[in-house]
Each structure stands twice: as C-alpha cells, then as structure tokens.
Amino acid sequence: MTLEAGQPVTGLAPLLAELGEVVRTDQAALDEARADKSGHVAATFPLAVVEARTVADVQATLRFASEHGIPVVPRGAGTGLAGGAIGSAGEIVLSTLRMNRVLEVSLDDELAVVEPGVINADLNAAIFDRGLWWAPDPASRAISTIGGNIATNAGGLLCVKYGVTREAVLGLKVVLADGRLLELGHRTVKGVTGYDLTALMIGSEGTLGVIVEATLRLRPLPKGVPVTVKAAFPTVEQAARASSVVSASGITPAIMELLDAGAVRNIATHLGIDLGDGSLLLAQTDGVGAAEEAASIAAIMRSLGGEVELTEDADEAKRLFDIRRAFHPSLQALGTVLIEDVAVPRSALPAMFASIERIAAKYGIEIPTVAHAGDGNLHPNFVFDAPEIGGHVDVPDHVWAAADEMFLDCLRLGGTLTGEHGVGILKKRWLRDELGDDSYALQRQIKQVFDPGNILNPGKVF
Amino acid sequence: MTLEAGQPVTGLAPLLAELGEVVRTDQAALDEARADKSGHVAATFPLAVVEARTVADVQATLRFASEHGIPVVPRGAGTGLAGGAIGSAGEIVLSTLRMNRVLEVSLDDELAVVEPGVINADLNAAIFDRGLWWAPDPASRAISTIGGNIATNAGGLLCVKYGVTREAVLGLKVVLADGRLLELGHRTVKGVTGYDLTALMIGSEGTLGVIVEATLRLRPLPKGVPVTVKAAFPTVEQAARASSVVSASGITPAIMELLDAGAVRNIATHLGIDLGDGSLLLAQTDGVGAAEEAASIAAIMRSLGGEVELTEDADEAKRLFDIRRAFHPSLQALGTVLIEDVAVPRSALPAMFASIERIAAKYGIEIPTVAHAGDGNLHPNFVFDAPEIGGHVDVPDHVWAAADEMFLDCLRLGGTLTGEHGVGILKKRWLRDELGDDSYALQRQIKQVFDPGNILNPGKVF
C-alpha cells in the first residue's frame, strides 16, 4: 500500500477510534513532520502525526504500533539538526509537543518536574523570578523542547562551565515500545541504585523509549554582573590559540565562542555592518569573580594579538552575542547547508581549524565555522547548491567527500563526530567508524533489550 | 570440590601457567579478599586473587574464567562499604590495584589518563602543582582507587558543588567478560555518538566489565582562601533545617556536613574533647566569593539558632573537619556497625532525621548519623553486638528490621537506598523495591548483554 498525505489511512482506524483528533493525517501535519532544522526533508510522508496530550496517549500509540509492527518516530518541536525526528513512509510520528505543563517547581530541592513538550526558554522564564534556572542552553532554546534537549543530550554555549543536559536531569518517566511506563532516576542529587538508565536514555534520540516526564536539576542564578569580552584576530589560528590558552589558564568563562573569517563575513553582510576581515572570539564571565576573570581573559587575548573590547553593559553584551546568533540566519541566504558538529580536545582547536581551511580549499567549498571554543565543539557549515526535488535536497557527493575527510581529521585529533546535535540520519554513516565494531554491536543489543520489535525510530542512529 | 585457603588449586593450573606469580592463592591474599570496609566478611575463601599488572593480565583472566564458567570479582583497594568486591568460594578475585600508573596529564585539555589502581589522593598529589585536581572525594580518598571510585560512582563531601564521579569521567577502557577490550567515551568535553556506555559502566559495581583505564576530567583548583563555618545546634532538626535553608538560599557551599548528637558524642569520646550535647553543622566555601558566601551561611545558621564560629585559618579548618573524619574510627570502639547510605531530597532532611530518631528509639539501637547535608545524603550507622564466627558477623534480625523501616521511610520521602556506596551485597535485598519490577528486569537484561555467561560479580547488586 502506497500512502500519500491526506489519504485516509484505514490501517490506523483503531488508533483513530481510540485517540480521536489527537491523530492527525492532514497534509500540513504530515509535511511538517518529514523535516527538521537540518535542512533534510524525507522524500515521503509519514502515515500520521499523533499529537499526544497525555501519558495515556503515548502509551496507546505505542501499544498500537507494537501490535502492528509500525515504526514510531518520537518528536518534540522538530528543531533537531541531524534528522533524528523526521518521519517518512510507513511511520507514525509521535509528538509530545502538546504535553507542555510544568508540573512542579521546588525552590528547596532546586528541581522542576516537567512534561516533555515544555519549551526550554519557557521553563527558564517561569522560574527566573525564583532565582533559579535550568542550565542547558542549546542555540535553539527559544523554540526547542526539554524532551528534545534530553533525547539529544543537547549542549549549547554554557556547557564548559555549567555542563551538558545529562548533568541537569535527575530522573525520567519513559514509555517503552510496548507501552509500559518506566520510572528512572531520583529526586535526589545522588543515587547509585543499579545501572544509570537515566543517563542511558539521555541522548538516545528516541530509539529506546519516549520521554513523558522529566525531573530537572535547577541551579541558582549566577550572582553579580556578567562581563563580556570581544577580541578580533587577524587569523583563525590566532583566535583558536587564544581560546586554548584561556582554557589552559584555569579560568572558566561561562561562554567562549569563536567565529572564523568566513562566518564573520557572512554575518556582516547579513546584518549590514562592518566586522572587519578577521576572526572573532567572544567570551563572557559570570558569578562573583566575573570582573577579575574577564580582565585576565582580556589580557591573554591582547597578548596573543587580539584587538579587545570589554563591557559590563547588558545591551552591548546582547549586541555582541546577537552577532554570534546571526550565524545560522546568515547562511540561509547562501544556499543549502550541511551543518556539522565535530568536537576535539580543546588543545586541538587550532589544528581542527587548519584542517577545515585545507578541506575548503581542496574541494572548493565555503565552510564558514563557529565553535563553542571553551569545550572544543565546532560547527563547520558546508555550503552548496543542489536542486530541490519535492522539497528534498540531496547532498552532492563532493560535499560528503569533504565532510568525510574532515571527520577523519577530527578522529585523528582525538575528537568525535557529534558534540551535541546527535547522530540522527545525517551522521550515522560515520558512527561505526568512531565506535568500533564491538561497541557498535553492544549498542545494538541494548537497543534490542528496550525495543525488541525495533519500532522506535528505526533507521536513526544505527 | 571444597576449596580451602592455601590449598593448591589444580583447576587453576592453566591460569597459573600463563600468569605466574600474578595469581596468588596464599592464605593472606585469600583472607584479605573476602572482606572490605563494610565490616562484612564472606564465610568462605575465594579460589585465588589475580593481581593484574597489565591489561593483558585482565584479559587472560577473563578469557580463562569465561571458558571455565568461573565467577570473577573485580576489586581495587577493597575499601567498599557495601560488600561489592568481596570474594567467596569458587570465585576468582581480580584485583587491579597494581595497575597504578598515571599515563598522561594534559594541562591544556584538563584531563588525565590513568590506570584503575591509582589511589585517588595520589593522583591529586601528583597534579596539585599544575593547579589541577580531580574532584571526586570519597571519605576513603587516601586509600581508595580511582577504578573503585568509578565502579561505585563514588560521592564524597564536595559533590553538591563539584558533582559525583560520573561527572568527572570522560572515557573508559573496559575488558568484557569474554576478554575483549572495549573503548568507551571521548577525550572531548562533549560527545553524543550513540548511547552513553561510559555512564552505564560508572556505578555498575564490576557487573558489566573490568575497568582497565580511565580518562578523567580535571578541574582548575579553586581560587582564593576557603572559609569554614561551624555551627552547634541544640537539636538535629534545627541543624537539618539550617542546612535546608542554606541550600534553598542559592548559596552552594563546597562542603556542608551534619553530625547528629549521637555522632558528636561518640567522636568527642573518641578524641577526648568536649563538643557539647547537640548537633554540629560544618560548611566550607571556596572560590573567589568564598568570604561573602561564608558570611551569608553564618548569618542563616545564627538566625536559626546555631552557635557559630567562622575561620579562614587552614589549621583550624583542618581541626574542624578532623572531627567529621573521626566519625568512622569513633564507631569502631562501639561494636559492629551496619553502615547505611540513604539520600533524600534536601528539603526532607529534617523528616529523615526524625525518622531515624524514631526508629532508634523503637528498636533500642544506637544509630549515630552524619550527612552530606548539601546533597541530602545520610549515613545512619546501626551499632550492634553480634558474635564473630570465623571472622564473619551476621547482622541480627532486629537490625535488619530497623534498616527496613528506615528504608521505607526514605522511599516515602522521595529518597533512594544508596546515595554513593553502591548496592553490593548489603543493599541488594531492597533494590527491587526501589527500582520496580520493569526497571529491575531491564537492568538484568543489560547485564546479560555484557556478560551472557554471568561470570562478572554474580550475586552482587542483583
């Protein structure tokens, strides 16, 4: 049976009967669910999108899918960058975006209990007045869900000081492939009863279960006035070296972002401002020692050839970070983009930037790159032109070849193919190379334990 | 075949031939390997103790054990408090204590690569001059190995601010039950390629594999002068409430330890000093804001009825924390002790202390208790007298009943049965109660994936 968007799906009748309007099969819903923010669009449409409102909706969907052997693609706001939540022919997309209640905030225990569809920034707005925040801050935080942040173990700008998502989750409720509800983790800060299935679930990209509730570890808002340091460098190697020296100096900035000349040029054009010809390094310190730490950072950057500005003004800081945030929008004007996400040990940042420059020249591709320099996580963006067919764009062979070469350089430098975006479908071609055969096989067996029928996001990650 | 210590073990001949003097079967080695620091001693002796020097020794032992279906008990320094590394009849104890080289320290990448037998404090002594430290600080840090810290996901006094062991490990090399060497994790701060098997391995208590190398995340040493605050309270409820209020105030002390009146009384007797009749709360702040934070903590404690002393003097601080460190030695004079390790949400600390007082009265048992109050982790110590038979002491039924009741109260308060010691053999009777049947079954299946022959530490945890 070939299925097209909008066509009544008789096989889903029992699920429609059980869940009613929660199950959407209209063209708009199916079209949206076959894409994410990676630029990748599936060539076909999924069977349906279930917009779950309750844990029971999720359980009913998974019981139905298990019984009929129908693949299920768990999905939040669809802001992923690796194609991990894209639905295609024969699949049900199970969205938890409508499960968006904050169930509890405890000031005393510094925790929040939330449904998975709560938008990251919405939670932070809701708890700001109580002097608390949830630290994970992916660039998508204004539009991405906490469930999605957990499913991908999302990173962001603040990880070097405040950790990744895994370090900000105490417990989870998860629905298994067969519809059983599982409770994992603790409300306590410590807990070592058995294997850490909470950590196993974080970053599993919808392949082990569907997150329906999360107990989050909150932090007190940093005290004092944040200080922002901007430094312009003639070359990206100088900027990368400066960031490595800052890291090695024992100072931990809350944020340290590096933009190479290609990224700076595109942003300047996009914003219609002059940002010079070189690379930029942006750092921010916070907490009671912010001013002292920022002064040390500025001194290091100056001594390594940077032209430095330093500000405690919130508006000026916002203006500086808006430059960084304009990176992705600035690329949209250039054509299609393959967004990469390699991470290397911090000391290897200069070498990784040199590799990217070399590969860009060899393949004649523009690869504007930004990096969360404080934790060695780079986002090289391979820009290319390719015909769009039915909303779908194929990455040309020479771009894959360039990405292949970059990934090999990254591994050689002790790095990893994805620092924070996840594997999804766009990086699974390299997963086995990084993990090795034994580790890859063990991961497949763990998948089998949780999802023996292989209905949860099959074809993603592995 | 019944085996006794010292008796030549013919079945082990091929292993003896392969590994030579690395395999010990003398009385002293076997006797030591049937106990740990929990006070529990196995009633029988293990077959042999393999004192591995190399990864190849570990692999040879596991290949031999797999081939012959012999259980293997991985072990470090034997300082565990839950019986997780105790060997008994028919088992090979595989010690990695002699694998104790620091293989690499990178200042630039803030990481160290170590063998598992390196003593926690030895690593920290070796890197102190470079301004770095490894944060996990179990009370046993002067005598426990890093491999053991990882196998139990060890906690300690500094977790509230600096995290548990899981947050301080980037990657592991692990030998599987069949002898294969597996490399997990990254040298990078971020990395989301596939499931987080590193986190799964941390805290798995030797049931999934044998750790033979670890890549550790180091931190810059905190700046400034630490400030120590000591407060005496008439009742433990007042002290517990003060610690809860400090936590809720948004201040994060590096250390916050609570000692109840029973603990204080025993320590005073042991040290021959006067410490008053009440409970003590000890806090320490560090970093650039240390003085300001300590002043706030002192103000809170004073306002809640504490008699407060505050010091920046290192010797005086050491003297105060030596009081805390004398807790375990002070109990040894009292008889046998069942060391518990519950953790509750911080706001439930006063209720948990009330529960312990109630249970102590009901069962007529002394239960002196200390708590890592900043993270809600309590160590109630059930003191009892029981006859020693062949070095082995059975916990009397009424002590188990009291522990049972305490554990149920802990669960009711949203807590967990072990915050940092692990399950081992002493807490496995409660594991299923906390995890629930589904989670328990999944954990067993994961164990099966890694160790299909069930030779790795069988009878521990599950």
Image: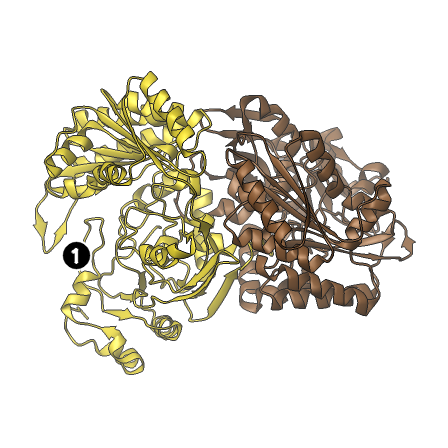
Chain colours: A yellow, B brown
Asked if residue A226 lies left or right of residue B447, the reply is left
Q: Nearer the viewer, residue A148 or A252?
A: A252
Residue linked to disc 1: A43
Outermost residue on the bottom side: it is A17
Residue A178 is situated, as x and y percent measured from the top left of the image, at 42, 70
Q: Is residue B403 above or below residue B166?
A: below
Amino acid type for the residue under numbered disc 1: Ala
SS for callout 1: loop
Residue B150 is situated, as x and y percent measured from the top left of the image, at 59, 42
Q: Residues within 10 Å of mark 1 (few under 14, many from 20)?
A: some
Q: Nearer the viewer, residue B173 or A245?
A: A245
Name the residue at 33% across, 59% down: A457
Asked if residue B228 lies left or right of residue A395, the reply is right
Q: Nearer the viewer, residue A223 or A154?
A: A223
Name the residue at 83% across, 49% down: B266
The quadrant of the picture occupied by the N terminus of chain A is bottom left
Name the residue at 84% across, 53% down: B336
Name the residue at 87% across, 47% down: B333
Q: The residue marked by circle 1 belongs to what chain?
A: A
